[in-house]
Amino acid sequence: MRKFPFVVNSIKILIVDSEPENICFLSQFLRHQGYDIKTANSGKSALMQAQVETPHLILLDGKMPDMDGYEICRSLKSLPLTAEIPVVFFCHQEELVDRARIFDVGGADYLPLPFHLPEVLARIENQLVLNAKIRTRGNSDKDLERRGKLLFITDRALRKTVKKRHHLRDSSDDIARYDRLTHLPNQSWFVDRLHQRIIGKQSASGNSYAVLFLDCDRFKLINNSFGHQLGDRLLVAVARRLESCLRANDAIARFGGDDFTILLEGVRDVEHAIIAAKRIHQHLTAPFIIDNHQIFLNICIGIVLGNSDYHYPETILRDADTAMHAAKRKGTFCEVFSSEMYDLARNTLELENNLRLALERQELSVHYQPILSLTTGEISGFEALIRWYRPDEGFISPANFIPIAEETGLIVPIGTWILREACRQFRVWLNQKSVKSSARISINLSVKQFYQPDLIEQIDNILQETDLSGHNLNLEITESVLLDRDESAMKIIEQLRERQIHLSIDDFGTGYSSLSYLYRLPVNALKIDRSFIMRISENNKNLEIVKTIINLAHHLGMTVTAEGIETDHQATQLKSLKCEFAQGFFFYKPLDSKRVEEIFELHKAAT
Ligand code: C2E
Ligand code: MG
Ligand code: MG
């Protein structure tokens, strides 16, 4: 157990580094340890984020492109909100001689590069404990002086912590290196083992080796559906199956959560590694029977072949993890790491960093696509669609950045902004009587947003601020929200319905909805996905599916909106099938608020 006087997953660490590979790997490693990690890749964004997030600790690279690390540290120390945050510098070999400068500018400690993970953890823990002590003693004029003394203790305390770790490592019943649940070795053991392999101390076969990073997909869903106890038993069963399909000289560890790592010895080439991955995949995708439940797992494996370019276990693990994520994204069972994947990860990271700043730089805006009643031909509402305009790149499609926003949790602040902005705009149009009082503004709500603990409170506040009634708001959720459906999802839906807020299932037909439980869901409408509408051809082929969906929805008391209508023929067919609402380029593209107001003017002039 950690000795912290606080809970580890509430501890925020800001990593400031211009090297994506450092940020990526270190942040993943620290997240695995339970820390809440934020990242910044420039001095400016570091200063801004430190003000907004007030992290408990900052890890700072001395070499930043826009500002010198020492300058960043000095600025942090001069600002009231950030002055007390301990700053630990990454110290490149050549900077070690000048490390006194780190302390001159107010730095708390330094981490020599390349990283040695146990040391990283020891130094971080040390700083957090010291800082917590300083905080509990309160601020006084003597703080600086005390801090100076504590710096001295830092080194002593650090030596003690590291020594303790080594002691643990040396003992034969080394509990620190085994996972209590599965009895497999843990991450720390695996990193050491890999290190030994790299330096050639434990090459059982003399041949090359491969590292596999294995992730159980949608494990959270299993925990939610069957309970954590069953989830734990499943992890134990996975561990035993993994052991049974590996050879004695291969090494396996539970890396954390539902991630496992494997060191395969004597791997001749990529094909050989893929065959092994296939074998593992086959073993693990056969159903597990636990407590009379038949459970199927979906497994993704990232593969890296060891070679002489790899000097550190951290780098191999980073690449294996990148390959695993590529497999997840592509929906394949395994992928072998390639440099293109690295480039993609780098671009994604860059996009993520820019997205963090997009709100503040006012690069985000909302466009509105009219939704028409097929009965009256009138505009019955709008769908709010986010747009990101980058001065040097132009518009970036939501399809490219919404998934990243979801993955990183940025969707939450962005989603709140959209909700407020679209409701505000709709209030203006209602006041102008440009839209009917029964009209609705439709806003997309992602899974992460849906499960924010304060979603209802937030919606209540926004509706109150904008003086909008619940019946003017339609929230579009996807089938995946309903797939993860448990008690809490039903409660949220109920609370939304109490407020007369409309709910639609977006992109209907593309997810996993089981028609059998659709009837139990208190949603108001289905939006048929564009892929079905596209297939309504001139000879009315493929009309049957659309007809079935519309009939089903009507039978369940829901209305239907068809999205992506591009031709007159599609509109006519949908009208004849009694589809109530329509949205698509045939009528209008998504428009900025100014263009929408021009349309209102045209309509007014025509009537
Ligand atoms: P969606 O919610 O299904 O939105 C409809 C998408 O279809 C929009 O794409 C719209 O421009 C496009 N569309 C509408 N009619 C036609 C048509 O006739 N032809 C074609 N080819 N496309 C049509 P967009 O704006 O690129 O958004 C893509 C997706 O990104 C959205 O799909 C939604 O899932 C997500 N998204 C957009 N804005 C937000 C947002 O504010 N929050 C969240 N969570 N997701 C958003
Ligand atoms: Mg939508
Ligand atoms: Mg849609």
Image (cartoon, rainbow, N blue to C red):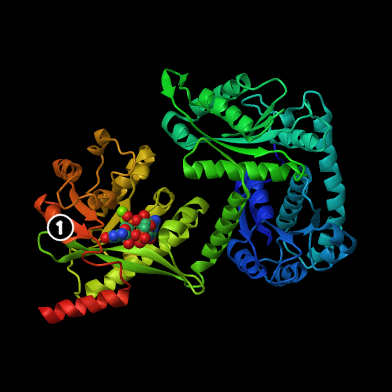
In front of the other: 457 or 561:
561
When the figure is inspected, residue 252 is found, relative to residue 483, above or below; the finding is above
Left or right of 561, for residue 482: right
Q: Can residue 388 be seen in this view?
A: yes
**Extreme right residue here?**
97
Left or right of 218, for residue 591: left
- Ligand 2 positioned in quadrant: bottom left
Left or right of 268, for residue 99: right
For the residue carrying disc 1, how many other residues have a C-alpha within 10 Å: few (<14), some (14-19), or many (20+)? some
In front of the other: 27 or 35:
27
When the figure is inspected, residue 461 is found, relative to residue 243, above or below; the finding is below
- Please give the name of the residue rendered at 64% of the width and 58% of the height, measured from the top-left corner: 55
> Residue 343: horizontal and vertical position, in percent?
60, 55
In front of the other: 539 or 242:
539
Question: Where, quadrant-wise, is the C terminus in this rendering?
Answer: bottom left
> Residue 263: horizontal and vertical position, in percent?
69, 31
- Please give the name of the residue rendered at 48% of the width and 43% of the height, measured from the top-left corner: 330
When the figure is inspected, residue 92 is found, relative to residue 223, above or below; the finding is below
Q: Can residue 6 be seen in this view?
A: no
> Residue 214: horizontal and vertical position, in percent?
58, 34
Residue type (three-letter) at the residue carrying disc 1: His
The residue that disc 1 covers is: 569
> Residue 129: horizontal and vertical position, in percent?
74, 49
- Please give the name of the residue rendered at 57% of the width and 26% of the height, measured from the top-left corner: 280
Image quadrant of residue 74? bottom right
Q: Is mark 1 on a helix, strand or loop?
A: helix
Image quadrant of residue 39? bottom right
Image quadrant of residue 47? bottom right
